[in-house]
Image (cartoon, helix red, strand yellow):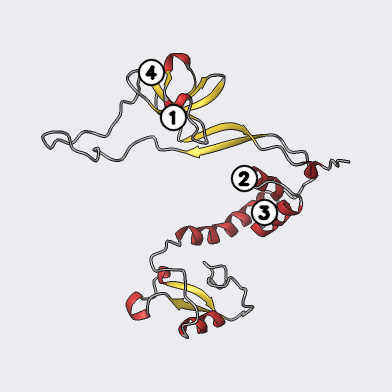
Amino acid sequence: MFRDNHECQHCNGKSGDKVLGVHHLESRKTGGDSPDNLITLCETCHTKYHQGKIELKQKRGQSLRDTTFMGIMRWTCYEQLKEIYPTVTMTYGYITKTNRISNNIEKSHSSDAYCITGNLNAKRNEEIFIQKFVRKNNRSLYKANQLKGGRWKANKAPYEVLGYRLFDKIKAEGEEWYIFGRRNTGYFDLRNHTGSKLNKGSYSYKKTILLERNKTLLTERGKHSPPPLSEVGVSCA
């Protein structure tokens, strides 16, 4: 019940029934009391299920580790932050959504962060930082298809090609890009955080400038879309 935030996982509290129980997705005899076999249901939904009036979308085997972890760690982080910053407060997604819609603000991660502050009279900074995690090593030892003679080809690319590494940040055509693919010919696959390719994924390394060596966390500067007139308080006659 703690993992499910003390809320019916079928109706999400819409039935108004405050009496909650634990339901076995598979019978207790078959599935046991393993956490991934248990969900919280209100008494109304629980009764309707056993009467055959409703079907549950949840199936056995659904991973709930992330939900459980966040449910536990949220309060731990909150209590520790309060010791450092006594004025810290907690908010919820429905409050953020209400503030965003009532102020006619576009939906984006940066907009959510702006609404979470609670200070909607503040002037927004147009610059944002976009981050993405990428792998630095390929854990697959061999390529999927065999070579002639039944030999396996190693699935490991050179660490450097013409002095460049995978996911190095470079400058080309006056903009910042990342190296997503390298060829011995010197033509690389350059992309930005949205996945857009420069010159259809084929650009000469001779026209690039190395800005930063590769990192697991790629960081790129960007801008959020401009706010509508109603957000900045401008009226049109």
The residue shown at (46%, 83%) is 52
Type of amino acid under label 3? Lys
Q: Earlier in the sequence, mark 1 or mark 2?
A: 2
Type of amino acid under label 4? Gly
Disc number placed over residue 163 in the picture, else none: 4
The residue shown at (66%, 37%) is 224
Disc number placed over residue 167 in the picture, else none: 1
- Kindly indicate whether the residue at mark 4 contacts the one at mark 1 (C-beta within 8 angstroms): no
Can you give x and y, in whole percent of width and height, for residue 200 in the image?
A: 45, 27
Q: Is residue 16 above or below residue 202?
A: below
Give the Cα separation between the discs numbered 1 and 3. Answer: 38 Å
Can you give x and y, in whole percent of width and height, for residue 143 in the image?
A: 25, 37
Give the Cα separation between the discs numbered 3 and 4. Answer: 48 Å
Q: Residues within 10 Å of mark 1 (few under 14, many from 20)?
A: many
Disc number placed over residue 55 in the picture, else none: none
- Kindly indicate whether the residue at mark 2 contacts the one at mark 3 (C-beta within 8 angstroms): no
Q: Earlier in the sequence, mark 1 or mark 3?
A: 3
- Image quarter where the C terminus lies is top right
